[in-house]
Image (cartoon, grey):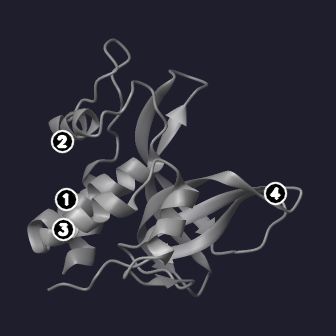
Amino acid sequence: MIRDFIVLTALSLVGEQENMLDMNFNKKKFEEYKNRQKLTDGQVWCTYFTELVWSSAYEQYDPPTVKKLKKIFDAGAVNTWKNFLKSEFLISNIPVAGDIVIWQNFVNSKACDTGHAGIVVQVNLERGFINSVETNYDCMLSGTINVQIQTRYLIEFEKDNGLVMKGFIKPFDIR
């Protein structure tokens, strides 16, 4: 099932990071993707990561969908969310492993244009949390991008400040 492949792909990339010496990624798949997308060194690209993971899955299960994804994904998480809302993909407030989770930044209850994205890899609805795999910019230590597992994000859609969940983008269920 495509969801399983999405989760396995995301988990297989945990620990990947830009090499501080040449700003290239250690894994060939990442570096090829970075060059194909014409990404700049050190660029923050959480939505690019989710596109890489989903595109890898659809290359295996439904290659024509990869072209659709290229038109939907954007460098920004909020713009990516808006593009998916206009697409044939389903959006939900109920997470399932393999979904893309999108957050939007809020300051004093006001929505900002910035946000964040990740791949849901585990869900616990009883306790109300998800675990995700995502890229983050390590500005404090090295100034590089790294892929990591984030644990126990509460599933909550209302906060006055910080990252607030927008929802979950569902992959087409292809067997």
**Mark 1 surroundings: few (<14), some (14-19) or many (≥20) residues within 10 A:** some
Q: Mark 1 points at which residue?
A: 56
Identity of the residue furthest to the right in this view: 108
Q: What residue type is labelled 2?
A: Lys
Displayed quadrant of residue 152: bottom right
In the rendering, at what x and y percent does residue 135 appear?
Answer: 45, 45
Report, in whole angstroms, how far the alpha carbon at label 1 lies from the one at label 2.
10 Å
In the rendering, at what x and y percent does residue 158 appear?
Answer: 77, 73
Pointers 1 and 3 in contact (CB under 8 A)?
Answer: yes
Q: What residue type is labelled 1?
A: Ser
Displayed quadrant of residue 66: bottom left
Pointers 2 and 4 in contact (CB under 8 A)?
Answer: no
Q: Name the residue under label 3.
A: 58
Q: Name the residue under label 2.
A: 29
Q: Mark 4 points at which residue?
A: 161
Q: Which mark is residue 67?
A: none
**Mark 3 surroundings: few (<14), some (14-19) or many (≥20) residues within 10 A:** many
Regarding residue 10, the answer to whether it shows in the image is: no
Pointers 1 and 2 in contact (CB under 8 A)?
Answer: yes
Which label's residue is closer to the chain start, 2 or 4? Answer: 2
Report, in whole angstroms, how far the alpha carbon at label 4 lies from the one at label 1.
34 Å
Q: In this view, does 161 lie above or below 46?
A: below
Which label's residue is closer to the chain start, 1 or 2? Answer: 2
**Mark 2 surroundings: few (<14), some (14-19) or many (≥20) residues within 10 A:** few
Report, in whole angstroms, how far the alpha carbon at label 1 lies from the one at label 3.
6 Å
Pointers 3 and 2 in contact (CB under 8 A)?
Answer: no
Report, in whole angstroms, how far the alpha carbon at label 3 lies from the one at label 4.
35 Å
